[in-house]
Amino acid sequence: MAGHAPGNAAAPPKCQLYLISPLDVGGTFPDRLARALAAGPVAAFQFRVKGVDEHSAVRLAGPLQEVCAAHDCAFIVNDSLALARRLKADGVHLGQSDGDIREARERVGREMQIGVTCHASRHLAMEAGEAGADYVAFGAFFASATKDSGHRAEPGLLAWWQQLFELPCVAIGGITPDNCAPLVAAGADFLAVSGAVWGGDEAGAVRAFQRAIAAAET
C-alpha cells in the first residue's frame, strides 16, 4: 500500500478503512458492499472466502470487483496468489504460511501489491519489508470473533513501526469504532475490520468508523 493507500497512491496519508469480507459473500452481499463503500471512503476490500474451489471463488468475486472499481476501492485477495493473478486483483494478502514473499513478487510483478500478516512480531515485519512487501499487518489488537490469531499486539508496536519505517502498517483484530482511537493515535495507516461492519448496518458502521478516526486524529 505504497503512498499510504492500497491501489491509490494519491490518497491522503491518514488512517483509512480496510474492509475484510465475511466468509459468505454470496446472495445480496454485493449490495451490502456497495452500501458500505458508498458510506466511505474505504481504501481497500479483502476478498476472504474459505472452502470453495477457484471457479466458485471467481464467480463470487466478479460482482464484488465491479463494486470496488466503481468506488475506487482496491480489491485484495486473501491467501491465494493463483486467484489474485486470475482475477487481476489490485493486491494479495499473504499469511506467514502462504509462501515466500520474493517468489510471490516474481509471480505477480510490481503492479500488484503484497501485504503480509506479521502478528505481533517486529522481526517478521522487518523481514517482510526487506523482502518487498507493500504493507505489513499487525494484530490481533483485540479479541476477534472473525479469526482467532493466537497473537496479541499492543498499540506501541504501531508507534515503533511508524518511527522507523515508511512502509504502511495495518492494524487488525476485533477493531470497532469504540476501541480504535488508540490504534489511530499510535499511527495505524489502515484499520482492517470485518465483524464490526458486517455484523449489522454496514453503512452506519463505516460512518461510525470515519467519525471515530477523525476524532482520534484531531
Image (cartoon, rainbow, N blue to C red):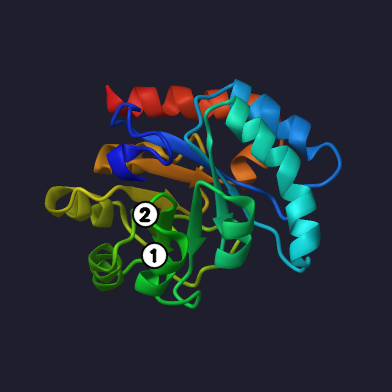
Quadrant showing the C terminus: top left
Residue contact between numbered discs 2 and 1, judged by CB atoms under 8 Å = yes
Q: Secondary structure at mark 2?
A: loop
Q: Which residue type carries mark 2?
A: Arg
Q: Nearer the viewer, residue 117 or 142?
A: 117
> Would residue 17 be found to the left or right of residue 50 on screen?
left
Query: Looking at the picture, which amino acid does disc 1 mark?
Result: Arg
Question: What percent of the width, then of the height, locates residue 60?
Answer: 77, 49
Q: Quadrant of residue 123?
A: bottom left
**Residue located at (68% from left, 34% from top):** 66
Is residue 146 something that shows in the picture? Answer: no
As drawn, the label of residue 170 is none
Quick one: label 2, few (<14), some, or many (20+) residues within 10 Å? Answer: few
Above/below status of 150 relative to 44: below
In the image, what residue occupies the spot 55% across and 65% down?
81
**Label 1 neighbour load within 10 Å: few <14, some 14-19, many 20+:** some
Q: Secondary structure at mark 1?
A: helix
Mark 2 or 1, nearer chain start: 1
Observer-nearest residue: 116 or 204? 116
Residue farthest to the right, as pictured: 27
Q: At 63% from the left edge and 38% from the top edge, which residue is drawn? A: 197
Q: Is residue 12 visible?
A: yes
Q: Measuring from the top left, give residue 171's x and y in whole percent.
A: 40, 50
Q: Residue 105, labelled with which disc?
A: 1
Residue 101 pos. (x, y %)? 38, 70
Say which residue appears at 48% left-offset and 46% top-offset.
Answer: 192
Find residue 4 and report its image quarter. top left
Point out residue 92 in the picture as x, y percentages from the top left corner. 50, 57
Q: CA distance from mark 2 to mark 1?
A: 7 Å
Left or right, residue 135 beside residue 196: left
Residue for badge 2: 110
Furthest residue in direction left, as rendered: 164
